[in-house]
Image (cartoon, rainbow, N blue to C red):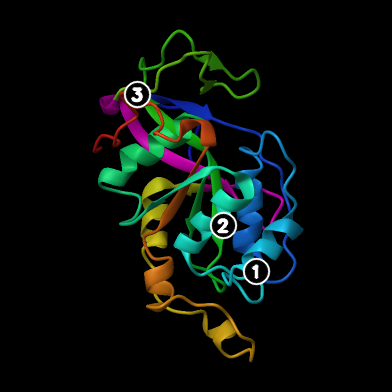
Amino acid sequence: MPHFSGCFKWLVYNRAVPSLIQEGPQCGLVALWMAGSLLSLSQDVSLERIVQVALERGYTAQGEMFSAADMAQLAEEVFQCRAELLSGGLEGENRGRILRHLTAGCPLLLPYPSHAQRPLEVSRLLLGLRDGALGPACQEDEQIPGLFRPGPACPPPAPEDVLEIYLLSKQGKSWRPQLWNYRQAHESNAQLMDFCPKRAGDGKVYVVPAGGVRAGLCGKTVLLHPRTTQSALPQPAGPPPAAER
């Protein structure tokens, strides 16, 4: 857990995300509803509508989603957004892309292993910065000393100033947001290898892609963009990969 004191400051990119508790194996669809609601500016898309479309397209049988590619297609259809599917995890070339996406205020879906291989909705970012790296447009939180929020037109921090990265997420099993160390989230996402034994033995039918969970979820991330940015998000100079400590 980060401490809001010490040798560097914390910069949080935070957007209010609605919560919804799932019923049955709908964790992926609930996460999509939470993420997509941030981009649905002209219509109110219900969870029931998302489930209906997923069933009609053959993406799911019980509400489960074991294919990030199917999730991306579903997102584009129900939210009229643009979905970008990344492979290879959160590190390497994907790190800068993901951080630019989050600092631009857009959400993503990140699968992680549990007893049910559930995904997270991620739309918030917490960066630990070297002391003195904050720009004048950043505003300190009134209740938490050492925690800052970017002001209007505040540029992302420079690469050499980023020391720590945390993802703030929600999922359908809890009302509370979760805080993930970025490296741990990457490692967790890379562990999605096998179908959940509990589900495999429950006698129900599930839609699993060719190649199984490894092919459908391992190392995958789905970035959701507003349809108005079809060409791509603007490419500001940061925040790139965090500096090695």
Please tell me in which quadrant of the rendered image residue 25 appears. bottom right
* Span colored in magenta: 159-179
Is residue 207 visible from the viewing direction of this image?
yes
> Which residue bears the numbered disc 1?
56
> Which residue bears the numbered disc 3?
236
Specify the farthest residue to the top: 136
Query: What x and y, as percent, mark residue 8?
Result: 39, 25
Q: Nearer the viewer, mark 1 or mark 3?
A: 1
CA neighbours of label 1 inside 10 A, class few (<14), some (14 to 19), many (20+): few
Q: What residue do we see at 75% from left, 59% from top?
A: 48
Q: Nearer the viewer, mark 1 or mark 2?
A: 1
Indicate the amino acid at tag 2: Leu
**Image disc number at residue 74:** 2
Is disc 2 placed on a helix, strand or loop?
helix
Query: What x and y, as percent, mark residue 128?
Result: 41, 31
Query: What x and y, as percent, mark residue 173?
Result: 68, 60
- Magenta stretch: residue 239 in it? no
Is residue 173 visible from the viewing direction of this image?
no
1 or 2: tag closer to the N-terminus? 1
Is disc 3 placed on a helix, strand or loop?
loop
Indicate the amino acid at tag 3: Pro
